[in-house]
Image (cartoon, rainbow, N blue to C red):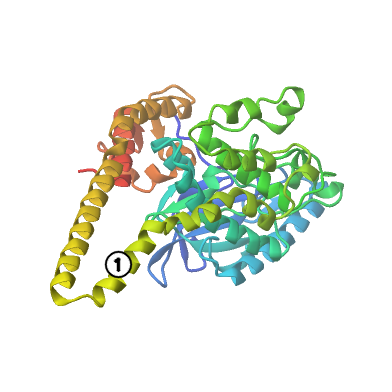
Amino acid sequence: MPSTPVFRNALAQKAMLQEYRIEQVLGAGGFGITYLAHDTHLDKDVAIKEYLPGDIAMRAPDGNVVAQATEGEEGYKWGLDRFLLEARTLAKFGHPHIVRVLRYFEANATAYMVMDYEKGDSLKTTLQISPRPPEAILKAILAPLLDGLSAVHAAGFLHRDIKPDNIFMRADGTPVLIDFGAARQAVGGSTKSLTAILTPGFAPLEQYSGEGKQGPWTDLYAMAGVLYRAVTDRNPPDAVARMRGDSLGAGLAEARGRYSEPFLKAIEWALALDEKQRPQSVAQWKEAILAERRQSAPVARPPESERRVERTVRMAAAPPRERRRGIWLVLAIVALLSIAGLVAWTKHRDAPNGQLEQFLEKSKADFRAADANGRGALSRAEVARHFPAVAREFERYDRNSDGQLSLEEFVDARRALFERRFNRP
């Protein structure tokens, strides 16, 4: 029987952390480990992020987190202070599109953030299910995220790891920015190992160096990378690779016709390699990326609608017989509009039908990519690391209760997520 991968630095399953019972690992990154936990006082699930920068720290036998070497102690302490400061700041926000920090505390010689556990799927999963969404949908997702990001920047913090995995789509369709990194910015060589954490394709050049000047433009590069992923159905090219030969323009050119030129130009602007050539603030980029929405706003009330209002006013002053004819005319128009709306909604609901087969084929490829050992099954830990939406209902799809998902079980799980997303029977 093949061994099940474990997160060696993670807290044990069912371990108690104050009133929280650790249920499973949701993910592990350069700055720490995120757990699904159960609040035994309030009887609800929460997400807990533990500060544990894997490059310089580890868990000792007594459960405490310590620097791996004495020369890393200063960097570890600096990062811990930043983690606590960021938790304290995020706890004050209360913004509907920034993950809510319920509390923070120190234990095990490290620190923890307790956050709302959101139900839904990551934007990464959403884009796999329904690639290249319409521009209007992307703008509806982007606008509230930019409002939240603006609040973060106003408080003096950067996210520094915006990507589709870290944008969560709640069950009601609203987005929330999650997984804020422990270290905001780098200063000095002692913290270089903390600042080297980045996601290729979504990280700009300044994040590759401790001397790089980071600011709001850094997060805007990553957010534009998310839009590039959405409109092209592939990740943006890595910033370092772009210095040798930039394929960004060619990728965006393929999206022309499906998306407006101002929208694509705004994406390209925020993805400029030189940070001085990018928008310098959320407000500046928002004006460009959402400009078409504001320009098209007057079209929402066309001249015909204004004439209809005038006819209604005249109708009120008309003789009873003419008024009755006018009322029936209005009712007929309302009925026709309702029928048209129902037809449009039905088409929208059924739109993913042709994509199911494609999505299931991609699910099989995702399974093979995650099955690093080629044993034909994914352990609970592997599913939690790569497919958190499936992991939340692991027991439901693990039909033979062997603690792992076969290809067939995994595909069934992804099929269920697809059908649930589009309310299919």
Q: Residue at horizontal 51%, vertical 65%?
A: 96
Q: Residue at horizontal 35%, vertical 38%?
A: 403
- Say whether residue 12 is visible: no
- Is residue 395 shown left or right of residue 115? left
Q: Residue at horizontal 55%, vertical 70%?
A: 94
Q: Which residue is mark 1?
A: 311
User: Toward the viewer: 339 or 133?
Assistant: 339
- Is residue 283 shown left or right of residue 376? right
Q: Is residue 105 above or below residue 244?
A: below
Q: Quadrant of residue 208?
A: top right
Q: Quadrant of the N terminus?
A: top left
Residue 198 coordinates in the image, percent (x, y): 67, 41
Residue 167 coordinates in the image, percent (x, y): 52, 49
User: Toward the viewer: 284 or 4?
Assistant: 284
User: Toward the viewer: 384 or 301?
Assistant: 301
Residue 288 coordinates in the image, percent (x, y): 63, 49
User: Toward the viewer: 341 or 296?
Assistant: 296
Secondary structure state at the residue bearing disc 1:
helix
Q: Is residue 240 above or below residue 55?
A: above
